[in-house]
């Protein structure tokens, strides 16, 4: 390559926001051999083989979705196509939350991680069955369905892809088995030295015998002491019982104590998100660390995979009935509609998740020498209606939309069928 064309690609004139590098301003991003080469102002266009004008657009480190469900087919209707949720939606890195288990992880590695154009990691399920359609089959998620030794062994042996452990703390499970499953998951996390990502908010229905003396509003305060710094509390804004806001409409005081101890909060948006409860939590100073989209086949209405039981194939009364289309970038718009700034939201999908995964040296930044994972989005002004699963509507004055991303320097346009269309107010 001659000196006059020292770069393969130049993204020119965009607003570059890279929290990890302390950059926020009009910059050019030069890429060579699939790596970030230079980020600076006024790079000569003649220095690159290809120049893409991104003026008026926002250039970010490749977006990281901390809550994906992409173990397609194996996890039934939950599992989405990784590239549909990933690079085709402007997202370069996905973290599957609890799809694979110690038994099924080889399949995840071979069929998802190695085959996808998106960078794909996993939080290994604490349960042997992994992320099956557990809201239909809760008996699979009892303490008898957890093998601590096998899960620790699998997590350690697959540390390149396994970055944490997925667990659930919700009233349906507590009513059946008490806190035992959660204690086992916490032990797996400690022994594997990996963060534990804990789902809060009712997931499984109550057994026929009822709550069995369990109080949904005490789950948080009983679970938090089991956790360590770096563990993650998910679904802070859930509309389901057992979240951060109790039945009295108050934010649990244990949340502030948990943050002070170094625990993190992931939005886990998806079907759990409530604008009403999010406002309460944010007003109480609860600002999430990371923003996972939690897209799955039950909140995007993707056709059911072949072989799905007929009684579940078109079930509109399932516990996750939701919007037809969604994306991580749309989740960013949701957070901004709640009053958070773009500058507050960007770290939630770049530098913070990279830290959560222990991969800050590889992803989440635009540092020279790192893989050229880059997301380009546009900010569309106007008045747009956003709706949650309680059918609460908010009017946003800005809507973020993905344009394209680069994954290791390779361009992928944002063409996913699940990307929502703007709805004007």
Image (cartoon, helix red, strand yellow):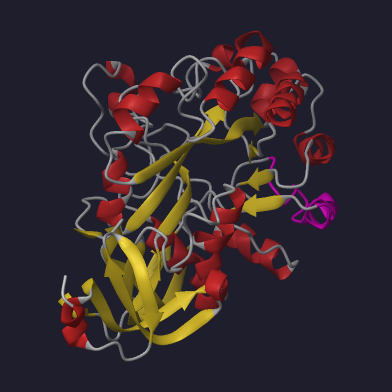
The quarter holding residue 89 reads: bottom left
Q: Residue 103 at what x, y percent from top left? A: 48, 14
Observer-nearest of 24 and 292? 24
Observer-nearest of 340 and 86? 86
* 161 relative to 338, above or below: above
Quadrant that contains the N terminus? bottom left
The residue at 30%/24% (across/down) is: 73
The answer, for residue 202, to whether it is visible in the render is yes
The answer, for residue 200, to whether it is visible in the render is no
Q: Residue 8 at what x, y percent from top left? A: 20, 69
Observer-nearest of 197 and 385? 197
83 with respect to 136 (left or right): left
Q: Does the magenta portion include 254?
A: yes
The quarter holding residue 116 reads: top left
The residue at 38%/32% (across/down) is: 78
The quarter holding residue 114 reads: top left
Give the extent of the magenta segment.
242-261
- Outermost residue on the bottom side: it is 42
Q: Does the magenta portion include 283?
A: no
41 with respect to 239 (left or right): left
The residue at 37%/76% (across/down) is: 38
Observer-nearest of 9 and 293? 9
Q: Residue 212 at what x, y percent from top left? A: 77, 19
- Outermost residue on the front side: it is 2
Magenta stretch, main secondary structure, is: loop
């Amino acid at each position: 390559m001659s000196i006059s064309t020292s770069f393969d690609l130049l993204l020119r004139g965009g607003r570059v926001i890279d929290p990890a590098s302390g950059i926020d301003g009009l910059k050019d991003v030069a890429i060579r051999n699939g790596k970030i080469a230079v980020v600076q102002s006024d790079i000569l266009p003649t220095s690159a083989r290809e120049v893409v004008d991104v003026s008026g657009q926002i250039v970010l480190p490749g977006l990281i979705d901390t809550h994906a469900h992409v173990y397609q087919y194996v996890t039934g209707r939950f599992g989405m196509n990784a590239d549909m949720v990933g690079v085709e939606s402007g997202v370069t890195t996905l973290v599957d939350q609890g799809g694979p288990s110690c038994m099924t992880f080889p399949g995840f590695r071979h069929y998802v991680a190695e085959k996808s154009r998106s960078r794909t990691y996993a939080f290994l399920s604490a349960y042997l069955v992994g992320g099956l359609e557990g809201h239909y089959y809760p008996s699979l998620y009892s303490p008898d369905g957890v093998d601590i030794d096998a899960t620790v062994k699998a997590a350690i042996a697959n540390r390149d892809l396994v970055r944490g452990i997925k667990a659930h703390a919700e009233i349906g499970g507590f009513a059946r088995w008490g806190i035992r499953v959660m204690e086992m998951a916490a032990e797996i996390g400690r022994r594997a030295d990996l963060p534990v990502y804990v789902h809060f908010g009712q997931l499984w229905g109550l057994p026929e015998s009822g709550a069995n003396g369990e109080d949904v509003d005490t789950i948080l305060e009983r679970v938090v002491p089991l956790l360590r710094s770096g563990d993650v509390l998910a679904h802070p804004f859930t509309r389901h019982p057992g979240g951060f806001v109790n039945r009295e409409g108050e934010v649990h005081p244990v949340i502030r104590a948990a943050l002070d101890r170094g625990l993190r909060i992931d939005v886990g948006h998806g079907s759990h998100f409530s604008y009403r409860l999010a406002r309460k939590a944010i007003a109480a100073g609860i600002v999430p660390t990371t923003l996972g989209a939690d897209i799955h086949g039950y909140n995007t209405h993707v056709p059911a995979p072949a072989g799905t039981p007929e009684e579940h194939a078109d079930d509109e009364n399932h516990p996750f009935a939701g919007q037809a289309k969604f994306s991580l970038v749309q989740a960013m718009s949701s957070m901004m509609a709640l009053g958070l700034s773009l500058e507050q939201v960007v770290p939630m999908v770049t530098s913070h998740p990279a830290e959560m995964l222990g991969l800050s040296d590889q992803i989440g930044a635009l540092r020279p020498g790192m893989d050229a994972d880059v997301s380009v989005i546009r900010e569309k002004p106007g008045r747009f209606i956003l709706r949650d699963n309680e059918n609460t509507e908010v009017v946003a004055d800005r809507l973020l939309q993905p344009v394209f991303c680069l994954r290791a320097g390779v361009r992928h346009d944002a063409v996913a069928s699940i990307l929502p269309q703007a709805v004007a107010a």
